[in-house]
Every structure is written in structure tokens, then in C-alpha cells.
Image: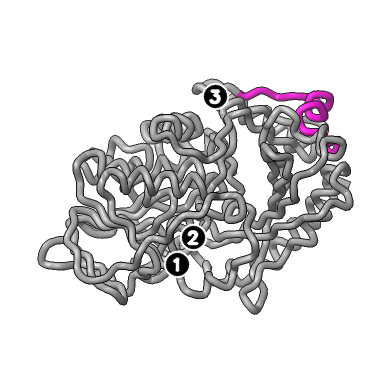
Amino acid sequence: MNVPTASATIRPASLWMHTAPDEAANPPLAGDLDVDVAVIGAGYTGLRAALALAEAGTRVAVVDAGDVGAGASGRTGGQVNPMMPFNSPDRIRQIVGGKTFDRLAEASLNSADEIFDLIKTYQIECQARQKGWLRVHHNGAAHRKSEADIRNWNAIGAEMSIVGAGDVVSLSGSRAYRSGMVNPRGGAVQPLMFARGLANAAKSRGVQIFGQSAVQSLKKADRGWTISTVGGRITSDWVVVATNGYSDDLVPELARSVIPITPIQIATDPLHDEIIGEVLPNGHTISDSRRVIMYARREPDNRMVYGGHGQPDRNGNLAGFEWLKQDAERVFPQLKGVNWSFHWGGRIAITDDHLPHLHEPQKGLIVGLGYNGRGVAMSNVMGRVMAERILGADPSALPFPVTDVAAIPLRNLKVMGMPFVIRWMKFLDYLETR
């Protein structure tokens, strides 16, 4: 990704860095290069686009200010959850229109299957498992909304079901929730290993990847576009911008079109069976329906990973880990007193309508971002779709509507007020779960 250097301060110890095999860094760009497509951002979106383009015979170069998976792709919670968040099917249909809704709904509901098929096709070693996703309801209102939404999603091909308190306990090991939804298509990956696997598949098909190569300028050229880094330039017919929550002013108004938020995670060392035995015994991932959600997973080596919302402090360091530990013990009392050895996070992008955005600000320039907490699954769909568009697909046939880049109204005030909003939402969640 075109990650600002300030992001380097958000570097707590990640479990994914700890458990991923060592891999040599990609070299920085040195000199000038001519390709068909230049990709800015070596996260899931950019890598998936690069892989699809390379398989079609396109010459592709990828640049990143860090390296493969340096942004949220390598620091995410790694849950592969199908189904769009926040919006009901009816609301999405209102936003995008009926024909686009059909394509978007199909892409969303199939997004997890698409990733696990991709992993099998390219033999990516990333601890992938598709054991299902359990979304638990924190109160009666959430249960009723979920029932209504599930009826609508199932009517167009989803396979979700409501489960009661007994099943929630047996599937999760938690007695903090009285009902939930099971989506059997959900699952998990080791996210950094998955990003590196995508990169290696792309490189084996001729894609060149350059790390430590922040893009300093993006300019229209006589032939297409030129991007410049401190080490060189790349000229191309197309440029893919895949910077998501790390977007800056490289594309006018792009950073102002999303609100960056910072999910954080904590993880334990491997735990004894007598401690973790009841927790997620069948391998489901779990999240809940609160405004400030939790999400968790049990690793194959009996580590526990627990995530939620964090916030950079004034020094750029992540805060919120103590609240996360307390919440983990509330949801899973079995974990009381365990040592949370790893603390980390990454920045994602929230859009105003809570849908992914696909933009073509100028001819030969394409942007995809804004996955609203479904980044592992939907970013790969976006990367594939952008590749299809570059290869000649009609915009009207894509699952994402091609829209103008537009700043969120009062965006800066909303970003400044986010810490206060999060505190208020946590208070409301507390009242509803006490």
C-alpha cells in the first residue's frame, strides 16, 4: 500500500509476524520501468488484481511503501466472513439499484468460497479453514433484526440459520449471548501468510513487486501514467490504486471519501486443553452484534485471538488493549488470567454508505477501497473485478457500481469526534448487555 511513514509507529508485536515463515523483503524500485499496469498497494486488493492481470498476459508492477501485507492485509483478524455488513438487502438495493444489487449480493455471498477456492488453486499455505462463522446477538433487538435480514439473504441464496442459547454455548463456549446466526461458508486464514502467498503466485507469473517504494507523485503521461518513487519511475497504461485505509492525497479527495478506523487484536500463547477446550471447539470464527464489536478465533495450536476497536493515541501508538482483555474475559471466562502475549492492529476504511467503492477518476486510473470490516473476503473480489475492468469488462456488468470519488460530508469533524463516538457506543452496548 502507499502507506504514510507515520504508520510505522503502529507496530505492536503481531502474532501473524511471529507465526509466518521468514521471507525475504521485496527490493525497492531502482530505475525506470515500463509496464502495462502499475499497482499501488501490496495488500489483498492490489495483489489479487496483479495476479489476475498477469494470468491474462499483462505486464504488471506492484509498489508499496512498506512491503507485502504491511498494511491491514497483514494485520487483520483474518476472518473470512461473507455477507455485506451494516446494510440490509433492501437497503443495499435502494443504494445501488436492482441489477447491480443482484451482482453485488452474489459476489458478497460467494466471497468466502471464492477465497478458499483461490487458496486451493494456487496451493497457498496459510492455515486456511472453512469451518463456519458464528455471529452472536447481544440483545433481543439484534436477534430480531438478524432474523429479518437472514430471511432476506436466504431468499437470494445464503445458507444462514438462527441458533438458540444452547447451540451458542456448544459452538462458542460462551454464555454471554442467548442467540446467534451461523453462516457455514465463513472461515479463517493466517492473513500475512495469505498475502505473501498471493504475492508469490503473482511473482511466479511475472509480476514485479517492489517494497519500501512509497509513491511520491502520480501524473498523466503522454502514454498513460507515470508514478514516481524516490528510487525510480514506472510508466503504464493503467494504474490501480489499492491503498484503502492508508489512502492519502495521491488521488484528489480519495482520503476524504473514507473514514479510517483501527481494529486491534490480542493473542495468547498456546493454551492447555483444560483452559481452552470449550472455546470454539468446532473451529468457527465468532463476532457479535454490538456497535463496538468483538471478533475472535481459536488457532490450530490452541492460541486464542480476540479483536475489537482500537484508537491511536497522541503519539501514534495503539490504545484499547486493556478494554479488549476485559471484554475477552467477560465473553470467555475460561480465559481469565491468561497471558495475552501479542498486541497489534491495522487501519481499515469505512465508507459513508458502508459499501465498497469502485472509482475511475480518469481514463486508465482505477481505485477500489472501503470494505467496512469485510476486507479479507471483499478486497479479493474487488481486486479481481478491477482486473476484469482493465481487461475490457463493461462497467455496467460489474458487481460494484463505478462512482465518482466524493468526500464524506463533515468528514474531518467525524474523524476528530470518533474517540467520543466510540466511548458513547461502548456505553450503549454496556447498557444493553448488562
The magenta-colored residue range is 160-176
Q: State which mark lies toward you, 1 or 3.
A: 1
Q: State which mark lies toward you, 2 or 1.
A: 2
Q: Can residue 18 be seen in this view?
A: yes
Residue drawn at point x = 84 percent, y = 24 percent:
166
Give the residue number, with chain letter if any, for mark 1: 3
Residue 158: which numbered mark, if any?
3
Q: Which quadrant of the view contains residue 299?
A: top right
Q: Distance between the residues labelled 3 and 2?
A: 33 Å
Residue drawn at point x = 25 percent, y = 39 percent:
55
Give the residue number, with chain letter if any, for mark 2: 70
Quarter of the figure that contains the N terminus = bottom left
Element at label 2: loop
Element at label 3: loop
Contact (Cβ within 8 Å) of mark 2 with mark 1: yes
Q: Which quadrant of the view contains residue 118?
A: top left
Q: Distance between the residues labelled 1 and 3?
A: 36 Å
Q: Where residue 362 sits in the image (x, y, percent)? A: 23, 59
Element at label 1: loop
Q: In this view, does 343 lie to the left or right of 340?
A: left
The amino acid on which the numbered mark 2 sits, given as a three-letter code, is Ala
The amino acid on which the numbered mark 3 sits, given as a three-letter code, is Ala
Q: Where residue 297 sits in the image (x, y, percent)? A: 69, 41
Q: Where residue 218 sits in the image (x, y, percent)? A: 27, 69
Q: In this view, does 24 lie to the left or right of 165?
A: left
- Residue 174 within the magenta-colored segment of the rendering: yes
Contact (Cβ within 8 Å) of mark 3 with mark 2: no
Task: Count residues near mark 2 (Cα–Cα under 10 Å), then give few for <14, some for 14-19, many for 20+.
Answer: many
Task: Of the two numbered discs 3 and 2 on the same chain, state the one appearing first in sequence.
Answer: 2
Position of 205 relative to 184 (above/below): below
